[in-house]
């Protein structure tokens, strides 16, 4: 299988709707491949497999939903359609309804013209790379017609009307029973995405006064200058309404960026720091360890070390954070972008659950978010996303190794650099951290210019 024909990136399948791989014929085959894997299990003994499907609010979701459903039905799989629901909600409902798998139709924080597919196993965790590779092989190299179900065994589909309520109750359980949000004013941005109905209800039912933004989806406005990628909008509203906190979710609500009472943005690194220090003080941070990714700020490492907490880094993607957490029984992990995983509460990044945990720390300590937020000081960080036309092993690029070695010697251990290809876009990400912003900006530009020249 050529690399140009790979389906899965760092977080499922993603691309522009009606272009490879998000075309109806490929999506139908993804459904068939997933259905075949589920139905061949000898333990099933003729029983139909069951898959739940949820989506966000983008226009192409209808098309993808129908294609996926048709593919699964053709293999003998029963499908239950949940409608718009956050990605972590699909992970929860998959387990809650004892489904064999769950599928999310979403391109997360991308604009409306993109769409994607994320797959959960029966345990509510995203499927491993080995299953993704098997699905790719079945879709791209295998004739699925010999595996189609017989006329009497074709699967059925139905819509489930109470999935919203199930998830709302699940998310609220992340907030301690001894607290309420009475008297708290929250600005909430749902990014015109999957959380537009459930997120306001979660915080309102706990007693908060909620000023809601981004809750009028029309198929085109998901993530459109709204949500976690545009926290300035919430920051402005927090100041305008004199709110206690701002909560900004992305299109599928698996990530959150918060805003404190002074209008300062609180990203995933800071949320991790706030949660880790609180859990450590309570003696519930397992193995005194927090899991982050290569993109997290070095300031997190410094603060954690000062408080006796170890930071373990993984590849970018909340899936890999979760895998590391499960492998070593860690309870807290996440990404700077706002994917935060509380392993005792959710199987994947959950924006609402993460926000509720921060609000719980505020209640427990009697402190504002701005007071909690000031404990972590970011080290200057420069990130450049450079568009490229092809991928190549970086160490094989002429002059790359020498440039990296030279920059590392200039940093003298007071900083770091990290370069990687995006798993979802044709770009390469260059990250440099250090105490001197002018110097690290120059280093990042040097690396980006070299890669743009050699890979474009």
Image (spheres, rainbow, N blue to C red):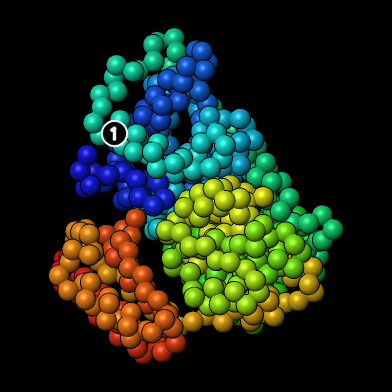
Q: Nearer the viewer, residue 286 or 276?
A: 286
Q: Is residue 324 above or below residue 283?
A: above
**Counting other residues with Cα less than 10 Å from the Cα at mark 1, is it few (<14), some (14-19), or many (20 or more)?**
some
Residue beneath the point at 21% across and 47% down: 4
Q: Horizontal and vertical percent for residue 317?
A: 44, 56
Residue 290 screen position, x and y as percent: 59, 62
Q: Residue furthest right?
A: 178
Q: Is residue 149 above or below residue 351?
A: above
User: Residue visible at 50% across and 49% down?
Assistant: 323
Q: Is residue 57 left or right of residue 290?
A: left
Q: Point out the image quarter for the C terminus.
A: bottom left
Q: Position of residue 7 (x, y in %)?
A: 31, 43
Question: Which residue is nearer to you in this view: 112 or 381?
Answer: 381
**Residue picked out by circle 1:** 137
Residue 88 visible somewhere in the drawing: no
Check the picture and name the quadrant holding the N terminus.
top left
């Amino acid at each position: 299988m050529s690399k140009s024909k790979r389906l899965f990136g760092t977080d499922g399948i993603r691309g522009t709707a009606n272009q490879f791989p998000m075309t109806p014929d490929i999506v139908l085959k993804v459904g068939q491949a997933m259905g075949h894997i589920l139905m061949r299990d000898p333990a099933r003994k003729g029983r139909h497999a069951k898959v739940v499907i949820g989506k966000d609010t983008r226009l192409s979701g209808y098309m993808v939903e129908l294609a996926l459903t048709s593919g699964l039905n053709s293999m003998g799989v029963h499908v239950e359609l949940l409608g718009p629901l956050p990605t972590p909600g699909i992970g929860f409902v998959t387990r809650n309804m004892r489904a064999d798998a769950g599928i999310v139709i979403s391109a997360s924080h991308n604009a409306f013209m993109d769409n994607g597919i994320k797959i959960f196993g029966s345990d509510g965790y995203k499927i491993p790379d080995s299953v993704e590779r098997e699905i790719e092989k079945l879709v791209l190299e295998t004739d699925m017609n010999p595996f189609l179900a017989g006329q009497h065994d074709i699967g059925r589909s139905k819509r489930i009307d109470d999935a919203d309520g199930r998830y709302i109750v699940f998310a609220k359980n992340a907030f301690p029973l001894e607290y309420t949000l009475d008297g708290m004013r929250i600005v909430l941005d749902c990014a015109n995405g999957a959380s537009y109905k459930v997120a306001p209800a979660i915080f309102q039912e706990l007693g908060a006064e909620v000023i809601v933004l981004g809750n009028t989806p029309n198929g085109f406005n998901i993530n459109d200058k709204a949500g976690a990628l545009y926290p300035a909008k919430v920051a402005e509203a927090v100041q305008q309404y004199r709110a206690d906190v701002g909560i900004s979710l992305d299109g599928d609500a698996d990530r959150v960026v918060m805003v404190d009472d002074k209008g300062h943005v609180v990203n995933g690194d800071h949320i991790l720091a706030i949660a880790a220090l609180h859990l450590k003080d309570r003696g519930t941070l397992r193995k005194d360890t927090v899991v982050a990714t290569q993109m997290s700020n070095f300031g997190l490492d410094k603060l954690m070390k000062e408080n006796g907490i170890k930071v373990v880094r993984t590849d970018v993607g909340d899936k890999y954070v979760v895998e590391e957490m499960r492998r070593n029984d860690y309870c807290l992990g996440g990404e700077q972008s706002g994917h935060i995983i509380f392993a005792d509460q959710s199987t994947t990044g959950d924006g609402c659950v993460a926000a509720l945990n921060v609000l719980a720390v505020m209640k427990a300590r009697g402190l504002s978010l701005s007071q909690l937020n000031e404990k972590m000081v970011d080290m200057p960080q420069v990130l450049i996303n450079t568009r490229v036309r092809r991928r190549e092993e970086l160490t094989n690029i002429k002059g790359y190794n020498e440039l990296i070695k030279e920059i590392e010697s200039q940093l003298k251990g007071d900083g770091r650099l990290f370069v990687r290809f995006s798993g979802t876009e044709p770009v390469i990400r260059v990250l440099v951290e250090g105490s001197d912003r002018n110097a690290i900006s120059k280093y990042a530009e040097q690396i980006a210019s070299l890669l743009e020249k050699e890979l474009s």
